[in-house]
Image: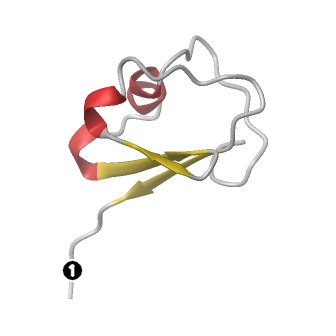
Amino acid sequence: MLNGKQTVLEKTETIGDLLREKGLEHNKVVVEVNRNIIKQHQFEQFTIKNGDKVEVLRFVGGG
């Protein structure tokens, strides 16, 4: 599950892979896996497993 939608990820093993696949910058997002926030320094090592629920939130500026 990615942001509430059933998603098949091709060649995605880590959060870093996912962010690159989706064209997102590491320093502009917060990632939650199974309701746990993953720290940015863990993105390249944290493996996404089948059945994980992943939420990616982007920072948006404005006022």
Question: Label 1 is placed on what type of residue?
Answer: Gly
Horizontal relation, residue 8 to residue 20: left or right: right
Q: Residue furthest top?
A: 11
Q: Nearer the viewer, residue 14 or 6?
A: 14
The number of callouts visible is 1
Instruction: Point out residue 1 in the picture as x, y percentages from the top left corner.
Output: 72, 42
Q: Residue at left 75%, top 24%?
A: 50
Q: Tag 1: Cα neighbours inside 10 Å, few (<14), some, or many (≥20)?
A: few
Q: Residue at left 55%, top 15%?
A: 13
Horizontal relation, residue 7 to residue 54: left or right: right
Q: Residue furthest bottom?
A: 63
Instruction: Point out residue 55 in the picture as x, y percentages from the top left corner.
Output: 56, 50
Q: Nearer the viewer, residue 10 or 48?
A: 48
Residue 25 in view here: no
Quarter occupied by residue 27 = top left
Instruction: Point out residue 38 in the picture as x, y percentages from the top left corner.
Output: 41, 41
From what the image shows, is residue 1 above or below residue 35?
above
Horizontal relation, residue 58 to residue 34: left or right: left
Instruction: Point out residue 7 in the picture as x, y percentages from the top left corner.
Output: 73, 36
Q: Secondary structure at mark 1?
A: loop
Q: Nearer the viewer, residue 53 or 9?
A: 53
Q: Residue at left 39%, top 17%?
A: 45
- Residue holding disc 1: 62
Q: Residue at left 53%, top 48%?
A: 36
